[in-house]
Structures are given as structure tokens and as C-alpha cells.
Amino acid sequence: MKKDTQTRRKKNEKEWVKMCSRPLFNLYQSTMEANLWQIRLNGSGGYLRRRFNAPTLRAALDEAVRVAGLDALESKEQVILLADAFSMTLANTNRREPSRRAWLRDTERFMRWLKKRYPLCIHWGMMTRQVFREYLGTFKGLSDNHKRLSMQPLLQTAGFMHREYGFPNIGERMGIGSKLRKTPPTVYLEDAVAFCDYLREHRPHLEVGAALQGLAGLQVQEALRLTWKNVDLERGFIEVTGEVKNVYRNRVIPVTNRVLEALRRAEERRREREGKVQSLTGHVLVGVKGEPYTEYQSYCRQLKTAMLRWNPQIDWAPKDLRNCLPTFAKMEGIHGTIWEQYIGHSPGTVTDRHYVPRLTARTSGEENALLRAMELFRKFVTLPLETQAPAGEICNFLQLSGSDGASESEEGSVSAVE
């Protein structure tokens, strides 16, 4: 393989001869065709290379400046700085403040990478599809959704520059991946309860997080942000707050008795540590020694390890625990607007957005309205959950597994439940 690469490199060197050198670029002439020229920008690696035809060396120098975008183009394309291109695109999009900050953060990351990799690429006419591809490669190993959100400023700017200024749309059909490329794993309610029972015995510090995700519908970040000042153990309420893009994520909801038990056990461990730790964090989810999780990945790694020890054949990801409540509601035929508000989903229809009362919002000074909302949540959400999820049942996915792997996993799961 190495020998073939060296052979191709020598062959390319024979096909092109350097004819002229400038501070920003080098000009090469083809040995096969006298009128074929190639410009290579200094420090651009193998991507920013352009070929063109010119009869003489003088004509080739003039054409090289135009082809590389180092001078004003004689077409309808304009010389627009990259920063101006991103700013104009952002100004013409309808985004809330959190979404604007995410846009600026992703744009700054790309500009830092571009300055380090291609310092001479300063305006949009010099951007190529290959540069986008190379930058997309920096997200290797991350989810398609993360890639899509991180690349969104680039792809939208490419489309805007194509529509408004006639630049080629270098961002179309990048093939990042379908949003629903595979069906998310099914998390049954009985399985989530059995997993929480396992954590209570073997990983007590992770129990409250799994209970909040699987039995209260919180996202991983929502569970990590939850503090004790937003937990009312006497009335069984929790308040999910945070600066998020979707305002419907902020909500006050009642939780099931199983979640309350996990919260009370976490509160007892917190009180036991107060005499040993001088400065105690207010977060509900903490590590073994009482330290808060500073990284999303740290908590997810510990939870994934516990899942595999509970059942080595499990195909859940830590974030999949949240799928439990929507799956239960759909399968029981009780899914509706109240369930959507409990989970924190955005309304899907105009009626839900403008005419259905938003029960999850804490209305300032209206305690009675909050109590009425909690009663509705208890009637349509927590009561069906507590009725259908007795602790200690064998997991559904073990009952549906094949006979070979089911028997081994069933023994470990039954012992964990017991």
C-alpha cells in the first residue's frame, strides 16, 4: 500500500511542473497539455487546488488570481468574508436566544478549526465541499444528531449564499444521516422498574438518576441539573428548570412513589455526608463520594456500565431510559396532550399551542392553579404508572429473548430484582 502511494506521488510530480511561485500560491503547468494549469494555495494541503486553461504564463497568472478567489470575481459571485456570510445568514433566520448562542458557538468552533487548517481561506468564494467534508470528519464517533446540529450553521449558510449571491451550494446532500436511521430501543415500564431495583442494591448513587429518567421522563441533562431546592418531597413535586431552547422543558410535575422513594434515599445519603463534607453540592445526582457530575459523559459511562452488568445483552443507551413513558402511554392508548406536557414535548398542533392550558408552567402567585395541574397529572400520568408497574416483575425483553441467551440473563436479572 505504501509503495503504491509513493508511485502515485512520483507520477503526479512528473505530470506537473512548478512554473511560478507567489506568496499566496504556486502555479504549475501540465507536462501532458501545454494549456492546462493548476494553482495550489500555500498551506492548503491537497484540497484547495484548482485547474484551468490559459495560453501563456502571463495569462495563467492573471487567471490564477481569479480562479483562487484572491481578487474580485468577474461573475455575479461577490467577495464576501466568511464572518459576514455567517452573520448575514444568522440575521435572516428566526432563532431564539439559546439557539442563537448555539449557532455562534458552532460557528466559532469551525472558524478556529479553519484558521488552523486553512489560514488563507478567508472569504466564501474559497470554500469547497471538500473542506466541509474534512470538518465533518472531526465529529467521528459522535451521533448523527450531534453532527447535524454542529454542521447546521455551515449548511444553512451555504444554502443562503447560493440563493442570495449565486454561489454553488456546497452543503447539499452531505449524507450526515437520517434522523430516524434506526428504531430507538424499546424500554418497557417493568424493565425500567427492575433496573432501578438493581441499582438500589448494587449502585445506590445511580438509582435516583435512572428513576428520574425512566419513571419521570427527564432528559439526562435535566436530571443532572436538578437541585434539592427544586424538589418537594412532602408534596411529591419536582421543578425542572434550565435555560433551554424549548421553553416547554421547564415544568413542575408530580412523580410516582417509586421516584419519591429513590429521592428520599438520596436525601438520606446526603444528610449522612453533611458531617464529613464541608461544602455540599445542591445537586440531586452526585457520585459515590458526593461530588457533582461535571461532565455529561461521566454519568453516562457509569450508567451504561451498570446496564451491562445488570444484563449483558441490553441494547439501551443511557438516554434511552426516557423512552419508557412515551412507550407506555402509546401502548396503553392513553397518550395525549397531558402526557406531552408531563414529558416536556412541544405542542404539535395549533390547538395545543394556543388553546390548551399549559399545566406544566408554574404560574406566579397562583398556588391553586398549580395544585389543580398536579391533580390532572396524577390522574392521567402517575396513577396509571403506579397501577401498571409493580416492583419485582421479570423484564419483558428477557421473556421475549431467545432460549439460548435468555436463560443465562434471566438468572442474573431475577436475582437482581429479588
Image (cartoon, grey):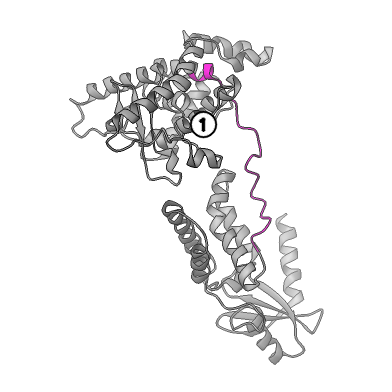
Is residue 108 rendered to the left or right of residue 370? right
Is residue 86 rendered to the left or right of residue 231? right
Magenta span contains residue 171: yes
- Residue 396 percent coordinates (x, y): 59, 15
Amino acid residing under circle 1: Thr
The image quarter in which residue 180 lies: top right
- Number of numbered labels in the structure image: 1
Give the labeled residue for mark 1.
337
- Residue 209 percent coordinates (x, y): 41, 27
Q: Is residue 287 visible?
A: no
Magenta span contains residue 19: no
- Magenta stretch: dominant SS? loop
Q: Which residue sits at x=45%, y=56%?
A: 100
Q: Nearer the viewer, residue 96 or 5?
A: 96
Task: Classify 244 as above or below 6.
Answer: above
- Residue 92 percent coordinates (x, y): 52, 64
Is residue 211 rendered to the left or right of residue 73? left
Q: How many residues crowd around disc 1 within 10 Å: few (fewer than 14), some, or many (20 or more)? A: some
Q: Nearer the viewer, residue 393 or 15?
A: 393
Q: Nearer the viewer, residue 173 or 371?
A: 371
Q: Which residue sits at x=31%, y=33%?
A: 227
Q: Which residue sits at x=64%, y=33%?
A: 183
| Label 1 secondary element | helix
Q: Which residues are magenta?
A: 170-193
The image quarter in which residue 290 lies: top left
Q: Nearer the viewer, residue 92 or 228?
A: 92
